[in-house]
Image: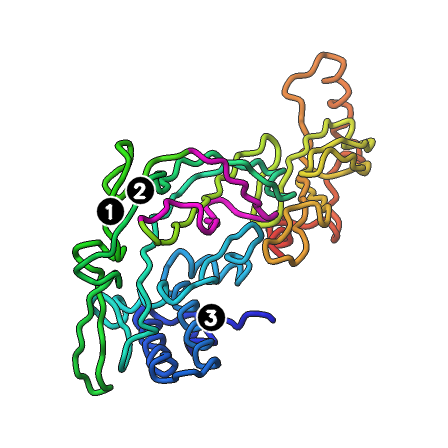
Amino acid sequence: MAKRDYYEILGVTKSATTAEIKKAYRKMAIKYHPDKNPDDSEAEAKFKEAAEAYEVLSNADKKARYDQFGHQAFDGSGGFGGGGGMNMDDIFSQFGDIFGGGGFSGFGGGFGGGQRRVKGSNLRIRVSLTLEEIANGVEKKIKVKRKVQAPGTTYKTCATCNGQGQVTRVTNTILGRMQTASACPTCGGAGQSIDKKPADADGQGLKVKEETVSVKIPAGVVDSMQLKVTGKGNEAPGNGISGDLLVVIEEKEHETLKREGDNLHYDLYVSLPDAVLGTSKEIDTVTGKVRIKVDAGVQSGKILRLRGKGIPSINGYGSGDLLVHVNVWTPKTLNKEQKQFFESMKNDEHFDPKPESTDKSFFEKVKDMFS
């Protein structure tokens, strides 16, 4: 089933301010909160849906990527996600932002009464890709140094929070009893403290380990796009959950091709004789070399469009084009014989400029490039 538009979920427009987005989410969170709608699976689904929308739209970088690429910006293959896959711990951690304080638990007896699970820290790594890899998609094997629980480490229940990982405070408001929660100051929210640990472990019972992570990168990614591999960040102590590995795309510059969105540009230089008589030339594409025909009498500045030879759309809407810019190379030096030939052609009508209605101006060519 297709995901609903995040703006539609929160009932705001794309031009909504951060404050308006926060206000809309607060309204939805109160309306569909599990404590107000016990045993209501539909309300719970809407509660999670609103949290996912807010998680993306409240973040300037994620919002910009969502506006450009839609859900595809976060739902690519290989375990990537942006707002998707949120659990209740992730959702309630947002409430310190929209309601103030450490966290927001409910209108009555809290949410579920379960233990709060601490999440390990995220890791960020840059991956450099060639234009060919971006065009075709690629699977990369990446070496990552991440913290994992050291073998032999044991934990015991925190006496301060009785293993809950959080301390709560109840206040009365016009909406009823509001329960706020914050991480336990003793265990830092883990609900457990270290009982025993090996000598090479840190204060949380963790040690650094190098692992090789396989990352599937979909075709059409753009420079600086951030992909997420769930659970491949640092582990958390005790029964916590692992953080995520954030993969930042870095696009390598191509020797002959220039990227512009999903389109590619190629500068083709032809000699004056080839421009007059016509020729065929071999050019680079992201799928290998191809040979193209250059008609006799081609004009410098002409653009040849090879449809579908650009970069695949990250949204799956086909591929861009390869725009070949023809540049007629004028010789800078001539020998005596060559100079005499062109001198004799000065008054020849075949060499007089005679632009036709089909010969577009520079500005018309630029306009066509962006159409």
In percent of width and height, residue 326 lies at: 69, 37
Q: Earlier in the sequence, mark 2 or mark 1?
A: 2
For residue 194, which numbered disc appears in the image? 1
The amino acid sitting under disc 2 is Thr
Where, quadrant-wise, is the N terminus in this rendering? bottom right
Real-space Cα distance between discs 3 and 1? 42 Å
| Circles 2 and 1: CB atoms closer than 8 Å | yes
Magenta stretch: residue 345 in it? no
In percent of width and height, residue 175 lies at: 24, 86
In percent of width and height, residue 238 lies at: 32, 50
In percent of width and height, residue 274 lies at: 78, 29
Left-right relation of 364 to 129? right
For residue 303, which numbered disc appears in the image? none
Magenta stretch: residue 230 in it? yes
Mark 1 Cα-neighbour bin, 10 Å: few <14, some 14–19, many ≥20: some
| Circles 3 and 2: CB atoms closer than 8 Å | no
293 relative to 194, above or below: above
- Residue at 76% from the left image edge and 34% from the top image edge: 351
Residue underneath mark 2: 153
Q: Which residues are magenta?
A: 210-237
Of helix, strand and loop, which one carries label 2? loop
Q: Residue furthest top?
A: 336
Left-right relation of 257 to 241? right
194 relative to 270, above or below: below
The quarter of the picture where residue 168 lies is bottom left
Of residues 228 and 281, the one nearer the viewer is 228
- Residue at 20% from the left image edge and 87% from the top image edge: 174
Residue underneath mark 3: 6
Of helix, strand and loop, which one carries label 3? helix
Of residues 29 and 239, the one nearer the viewer is 239
